[in-house]
Image (tube, rainbow, N blue to C red):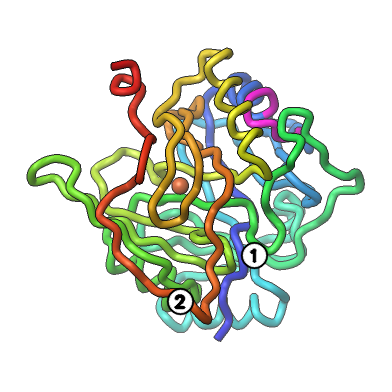
């Protein structure tokens, strides 16, 4: 059965492109691939021509998710499966494929109305990518851009869409009580050895996305990124800490759009031959505290 292979790119609609440019280039250590005539920015993090696209707008939210499928045959098979399952799937226009720097794409919406783009054969950049801020580089390759945590309108519909139709597999779940009577259930799904490419939860938050995660090649580079946030007044949403399920050593910073970015290192890899699905009862084994608590 055709399935997605990895998270290929992310598009955001942002109201303050100037703040985002500073944040992306100077704080996160991403590279500028292209500046569009409308002010949009295409950002690089590896050999792929572009990975994160910032479009001017007012929503300050996720605009689209781009999932890579291994080849054209698998892409067309997946589009057909989704179409037969009742989703409105349309073939992307050639100008959209050119803007995304991919050979071919199909577009649809996930059960929460988030635009999803399925594509194959992304363009590679002519020049190699090196980040002065992140000398160890970003962990991508077969594991893709990183991960996203989505806010689902309805968890069961998300489960069916991302697992049964896009072919992702269950990694684990976290079920935790944030406060008496307020519980949180998060489902983590993988498409490759990265512990999760998509996680989702039903939570009363105003945006489509809670955070996206970029994995760095060394713990030291996560520390330097944390220092850059402190030095430049970037709000820390959660201090350094570690998750029990993916083992990621990370912190969360608030992007200029209000949603968060997790900067991590050392995420656990999934081997489907030996993987056992578990349910965890906490979000973090240590750390990841809100700054107000961290100051106590
Ligand atoms: Fe995360």
Residue at the left extreme, as displayed: 181
Q: Is residue 20 above or below residue 140?
A: above
For label 1, the SS is strand
Q: Is residue 166 magenta?
A: no
In the rendered view of the protein, which quadrant contains the N terminus? bottom right
Label 2 vs label 1: CA separation? 14 Å
Whether residue 138 sits left or right of residue 66 in the image: it is: right
Q: Position of residue 179 (x, y in %)?
A: 14, 40
Residue at the bottom extreme, as displayed: 1
Classify mark 1 as within 8 Å of ligand 1 or not, answering yes or no. no
Q: Is residue 75 above or below residue 38?
A: below
**Magenta region:** 25-32
Q: Is residue 34 visible?
A: no
Q: Report the front residue among 100 and 136.
A: 136
Q: Position of residue 21 (x, y in %)?
A: 65, 25
Q: Position of residue 104 (x, y in %)?
A: 72, 66
Q: Which residue is mark 1?
A: 68
| Residue at figure coordinates x 44%, y 54% from the top left | 114
Q: Report the front residue among 42 and 247.
A: 247
Q: Which residue is mark 2?
A: 165
Q: Report the front residue among 37 and 243.
A: 243
Q: Which mark is residue 112?
A: none
In the rendered view of the protein, which quadrant contains the C terminus? top left
Q: Is residue 31 magenta?
A: yes
């Amino acid at each position: 059965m055709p399935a997605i292979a990895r998270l290929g790119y992310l598009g955001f609609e942002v109201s303050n492109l100037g703040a985002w440019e500073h944040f992306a280039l100077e704080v996160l250590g991403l590279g500028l691939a292209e500046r569009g005539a409308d002010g949009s920015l295409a950002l690089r993090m590896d050999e792929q021509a572009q990975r994160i696209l910032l479009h001017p707008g007012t929503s300050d939210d996720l605009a689209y998710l781009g999932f890579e499928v291994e080849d054209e045959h698998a892409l067309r098979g997946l589009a057909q499966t989704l179409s037969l399952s009742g989703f409105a799937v349309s073939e992307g226009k050639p100008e959209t494929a050119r803007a995304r720097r991919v050979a071919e794409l199909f577009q649809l919406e996930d059960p929460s109305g988030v635009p999803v783009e399925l594509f194959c054969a992304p363009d590679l950049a002519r020049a190699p990518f090196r980040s002065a801020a992140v000398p160890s580089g970003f962990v991508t390759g077969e594991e893709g851009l990183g991960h996203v945590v989505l806010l689902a309108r309805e968890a069961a519909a998300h489960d069916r869409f991302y697992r049964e139709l896009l072919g992702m597999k269950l990694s684990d779940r976290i079920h935790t009580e944030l406060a008496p009577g307020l519980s949180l259930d998060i489902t983590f799904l993988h498409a490759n050895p990265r512990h999760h490419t998509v996680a989702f939860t039903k939570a009363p938050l105003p945006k489509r996305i809670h955070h996206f995660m970029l994995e760095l090649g060394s713990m030291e580079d996560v520390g330097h990124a944390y220092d850059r946030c402190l030095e430049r007044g970037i709000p820390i949403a959660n201090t350094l800490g570690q998750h029990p399920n993916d083992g990621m050593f990370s912190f969360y910073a608030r992007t200029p759009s209000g949603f968060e970015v997790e900067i991590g290192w050392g995420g656990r890899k999934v081997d489907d031959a030996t993987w056992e699905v578990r349910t965890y009862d906490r979000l973090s084994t240590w750390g990841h505290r809100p700054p107000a608590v961290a100051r106590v």
